[in-house]
Image (spheres, rainbow, N blue to C red):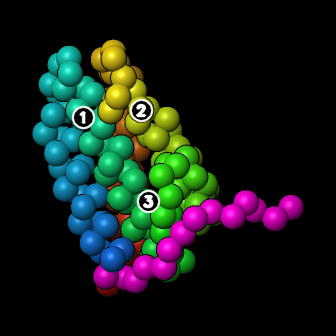
Amino acid sequence: MTPRQLRTRPADRAEARGRLAVAQKYLEVAELVSEEPGAGANVCVGVAVLAAIAASDAVCIGATGERYSGTDHAAAATLLERVDRELGRALKRVVDVKNESHYGSGLIGEADRTMALRNARHLVEEARQRLRP
C-alpha cells in the first residue's frame, strides 16, 4: 500500500536549526507558565503545542530535507511518523489538544497540561540531539 501523499516543501539544515531555536523558545515560554492555574494551563498547552510542531519540523528537515507545509497538524504527525514512529505519535498526542487549548471555551485539565509538556520536551530534546553538529 502506497503511503498517502503529504504536502511538503524542501528545507535545508539552516532552516532546521531555525525551527529548533523557535521550538526551544516556545518550550521556554510554556515552562514559564507551567504552574499557573486556570487559564495558565491553556496558555501553557497552547505554547507547548507550538514547540512540538516546530521541533517536528526540525526533525523532519534533518532527516529528509523536507517539512510539512499544510495546515493539518495531524498530517504533520503522519510525516514525522515516517521518520520516527514514536515521535510521530508524541506529536499526534500534543496536536490532539491544540484546538481545545487555542480555541476552546473551557480550561485545560492538569493531565493534558502534563502530557503536552512531557511530549513537547521530548520532541525538542530529540530535535536537539538529531541536529547536533
Name the residue furthest right.
1
Residue 24 pos. (x, y %): 24, 58
Q: Is residue 10 on the magenta stretch?
A: yes
- Type of the residue with mark 1: Cys
- Type of the residue with mark 2: Asn
Q: Which mark is residue 44?
A: 1
Q: Is residue 129 above or below residue 89?
A: below
Q: Is residue 1 above or below residue 13?
A: above
Q: Are the residues at dot 3 and dot 2 in contact (C-beta closer than 8 Å)?
A: no
Q: Is residue 6 on the magenta stretch?
A: yes
The Cα–Cα distance between marks 2 and 1, rounded to whole angstroms, is 13 Å
Q: Under tag 1, what secondary structure?
A: helix
- Residue found 52% across the figure and 49% down from its top: 72
Q: Under tag 2, what secondary structure?
A: helix
- Which contiguous range is marked in magenta? 1-14
Left or right placement of residue 43 versus residue 19 in this view: left
Q: Which mark is residue 99?
A: 2
User: On the rendered image, what quadrant is the C terminus found in?
Assistant: bottom left
To which residue does mark 3 refer? Answer: 56
Q: Are the residues at dot 2 and dot 1 in contact (C-beta closer than 8 Å)?
A: no
Pointer 3 or 2: first along the chain: 3
- Type of the residue with mark 3: Ser
Do we see residue 126 in this rendering?
no
Residue 9 pos. (x, y %): 50, 74
